[in-house]
Image (cartoon, grey):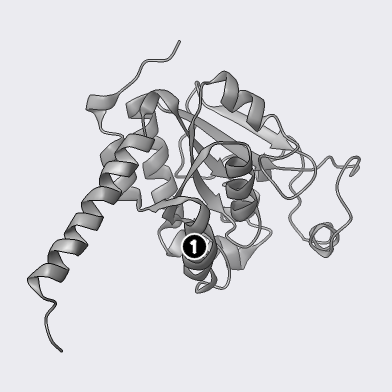
Amino acid sequence: MACPSLGTQWRLASRAMAKKELLAEQLDPATTVLMTVECQQGVVGTDSALPELAKQARESGVLNNVARLVAGAHRAGVQVLHAVAERRPDGRGASRNARLFRAAERLPVQQYSGSRAVRIAEPIEVADEDIVVRRLHGLSPVSGTDVDPLLRNLGCRTLIVTGVSANVAIPNAVFDAVNLGYTAVVAADAIAGVPADYTPAMIRHTLALVATVATTDDILGCLAPGRRVTRA
């Protein structure tokens, strides 16, 4: 196979540099919020209601990458927000207008409010300054929740999206964030879905059209301690 010409190598290097500069510009710690989506025990933990998804999130390194991003955000003074999906034991207010919701009612592990299932899963560390937003209905961690007003009050302009699943909640979060005027950054190796090959296809053919796609290492490089911001 022929090696790329010097001109091609230069163009590729230039594009990579431009992408890195754009990401650094977007990830100003003072106006960036990192959101974890449904990274809870009952979804990605060892006692998950969705064992296939949990296995993919853990064995692929996605959950560890989410934990790395959360730790990096804490070091840089970036606000972290955890979006949790749960339901009341009596089911009041829960959505039932889609097959997904009705199937969830029959799962052996329920995401009951106050239970272990809705605690943030290890190895993600929750700091005192983190915000946890809990929703009782719907598919999106953003629309119909407190997330948007909280982001605006925090002065957020860029939302980093991590977690699960690439099938439903992650694209919902990205689309809602973009529609509300935020810049969305998707941590490609910190989101998971099933089957495994669905996630890269979703990123390439859909999310990359509306969001900046970056790796965990790329994002952490932009959230270096030298850029730390102190929030009130």
Q: Is residue 38 visible?
A: no
The amino acid type found where label 1 is placed reads Ile
Q: Residue furthest top?
A: 232
Label 1: which residue? 203
Looking at this view, is 170 or 22 the one in front? 22
Image position, residue 125 (x, y; %): 46, 35
Residue at the image point whose x is 50% and y is 74% from the top: 197
Q: Secondary structure at mark 1?
A: helix
Looking at this view, is 194 or 111 the one in front? 194
Q: Is residue 200 left or right of residue 139?
A: left
Q: Is residue 64 left or right of residue 181?
A: left
- Vertical relation: 95 (above or below) 130: below
Q: Is residue 100 visible?
A: yes
**Quadrant including the C terminus:** top left
Q: Residue furthest front?
A: 7
Image position, residue 89 (x, y; %): 86, 42
Image position, residue 27 (x, y; %): 37, 35
- Vertical relation: 196 (above or below) 101: below
Q: Residue furthest left?
A: 6
Q: Is residue 218 left or right of residue 142?
A: left
- Vertical relation: 60 (above or below) 137: below
Residue at the image point whose x is 38% and y is 37% from the top: 26
Image position, residue 76 (x, y; %): 33, 27
Looking at this view, is 112 or 185 the one in front? 185
- Vertical relation: 78 (above or below) 58: above
Structural crowding at the residue carrying mark 1, measured as other residues with C-alpha within 10 Å and reported as few (<14), some (14–19) or many (≥20):
many
Q: Is residue 80 left or right of residue 8?
A: right
- Please identify the quarter of the rendering in which residue 32 is found: top left
**Quadrant including the N terminus:** bottom left
Residue at the image point whose x is 52% and y is 26% from the top: 130
Residue at the image point whose x is 86% and y is 45% from the top: 94
Looking at this view, is 30 or 217 the one in front? 30
